[in-house]
Image (tube, rainbow, N blue to C red):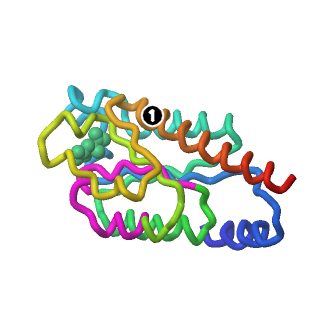
Amino acid sequence: MAERSTSRRAASRAGATSAVRQILVLSGPNLDRLGLREPDVYGSTTLEEIHGELGRIAVSRSTRVDCRQTNHEGDLVSWIWEAVDAGFDGILINPGALTHTSYALYDALKGANLPVVEVHLSNPDSREPFRRRSLVAPVCLGRVAGFGARSYTLALQALLDQLDSKAATASAGRG
Ligand code: DQA
């Protein structure tokens, strides 16, 4: 990611807008088991299939997605900072159970200061009480939850729509 970072930052200093946007897509603990894990709750689509679909949407919208999954909190924190340094444009994150426990993720996302959308396959609000608290929600633009694998695609579309409208506003401002 480091090389891209330099060129994107240079382009941005020169006032140019990069043609291809970059979105980091993060999935946390146990989401590598999608398709096998509690299919009645999380559905039968695998994470690989979800990533493939995100890639197709991204291409149609001049965007590159970098999709990653880990079972370790520290990896998510490091990847968020790498994305910042590399000049990424936004983050889609399904932190899994870390949603409800991780102040480290909250701090990283807050410090990253990028547009973030929180994603969940299930609807955490309709499940056990401990799932009703999201520690990352305060630093997210919004949340898409409860639509299974479609939560990811809807969330990507929402994030890209948001970036498009911000870019349109900025370019109207420049006259
Ligand atoms: C989840 C919801 C979390 O509460 C849970 O711990 C997960 C998956 C979801 O996508 O529905 O691992 O993030």
Q: For the N terminus, which image quadrant?
A: bottom right
| Secondary structure of the residue carrying numbered label 1 | helix
Tag 1: amino acid: Glu
Is ligand 1 within 8 Å of the beta carbon of the residue shown at mark 1? no
Q: Is residue 162 left or right of residue 150?
A: right
Q: Look at 41% across and 34% down and name the residue there.
A: 151
Task: Decide: few, some or many residues near mark 1? Use Cα within 10 Å; few <14, some 14-19, many ≥20.
Answer: few
**Majority secondary structure of magenta residues:** helix
Placement of 160 over or under 81, stated as above or below? above
Q: Nearer the viewer, residue 45 or 123?
A: 123
The quarter of the picture where residue 71 lies is bottom left
Q: Position of residue 84 (x, y in %)?
A: 55, 68
At 35% from the left edge and 64% from the top edge, which residue is drawn?
106
Residue 142 lies in quadrant: top left
Where residue 6 sits: x, y (%)? 70, 73
Q: From the image, tell me which residue sits under label 1.
A: 49
Quadrant of the picture in which ligand 1 is shown: top left
Q: Look at 74% across and 69% down and name the residue there.
A: 7
Direction from residue 9 to residue 27 in the image, left or right: left
Q: Can residue 135 be seen at all in this image of the molecule?
A: yes
Question: In the image, residue 44 lies at what x, y percent?
Answer: 31, 27
Query: Is 131 located above or below residue 43 in the figure?
Result: below
| 4, above or below 152, in the image | below
- Residues rendered magenta in the picture: 90-109
Magenta residue check for 36? no
Q: Is residue 28 above or below residue 83?
A: above
Q: Is any atom of residue 33 visible in this view?
A: no
Residue 87 spot, x, y in % from top left: 63, 65
Is residue 114 rendered to the left or right of residue 12? left
